[in-house]
Structures are given as structure tokens and as C-alpha cells.
Image (tube, rainbow, N blue to C red):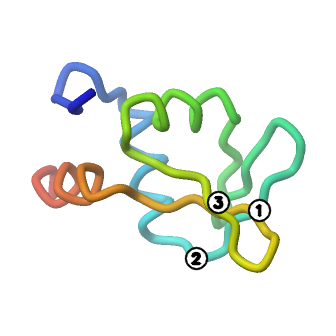
Amino acid sequence: MKPDATSITKTSLDVLAAIARFRHQKRLGRVWLIGDRRVTTKTIERLEQQDLVREVAFGGSPALILTDEAKTFLAGKQ
């Protein structure tokens, strides 16, 4: 599903910007710590459904990466 201006909430946009900005990410149960922010896994799941974020493992640790669609979306917003 391609993101458009009506499908992205302010919270989701803030989370995408935090993922792009901060390298330190850690999953703790139902919460992701992204930099100094706490983000619920439900928010991350919604972003995954919109094909904006993918969860991958680096050295056994889960991490979030932005897809190309999210990068172009963020570039257009700034």
C-alpha cells in the first residue's frame, strides 16, 4: 500500500523521522526504544502494513529500517 498524505498520522510521521535519525533501537516486550522515544509495537505494525518499515535482525538483535517508500516520503515532507 502506497503512503499518501491522508494515511500517515503525525505520530507515524514522528516515528519514521525518529527511525531515520537514531541508530540506537531496542525492542522491550511491547515497546520499541528508538533513541529517547518509546513506540508501541502496534504503531510499528501499522507502519509495516503500509510498507514503510521493516524489522530485520543484525547480529541476532532486532532493528527497524525504513523502506525506500518511507525515505522518499520523508524527503518530500521536509
Residue 7's mark?
none
Q: Image height check: is 5 above or below 24?
A: above
Label 2, label 1: how many angstroms apart (C-alpha)?
Answer: 10 Å
Provide the residue designation for mark 2.
23
Secondary structure type for disc 3: strand
The spot of residue 22 in percent (x, y) is 54, 72
Q: Image height check: is 16 above or below 75?
A: above
The spot of residue 60 in percent (x, y) is 81, 71
Count residues near mark 3 (Cα–Cα under 10 Å), then give few for <14, some for 14-19, many for 20+. Answer: many
The spot of residue 41 in percent (x, y) is 69, 35
Label 3, label 2: how many angstroms apart (C-alpha)?
Answer: 8 Å
Secondary structure type for disc 1: strand
- Horizontal relation, residue 21 to residue 58: left or right: left
Provide the residue designation for mark 3.
34
Mark found first going from the N terminus, 3 or 2: 2
Provide the residue designation for mark 1.
26
Q: Residue furthest right?
A: 29
Picture quadrant of residue 75: bottom left
Secondary structure type for disc 2: loop
Label 1, label 3: how many angstroms apart (C-alpha)?
Answer: 7 Å
Q: Image height check: is 27 above or below 31?
A: below
Quadrant position of the N terminus in the picture: top left
Q: Nearer the viewer, mark 1 or mark 3?
A: 1
| Residue at left offset 17%, top offset 56% | 72
Q: Which amino acid is tagged 2?
A: Arg
Are discs 2 and 1 less than 8 Å apart at CB?
no
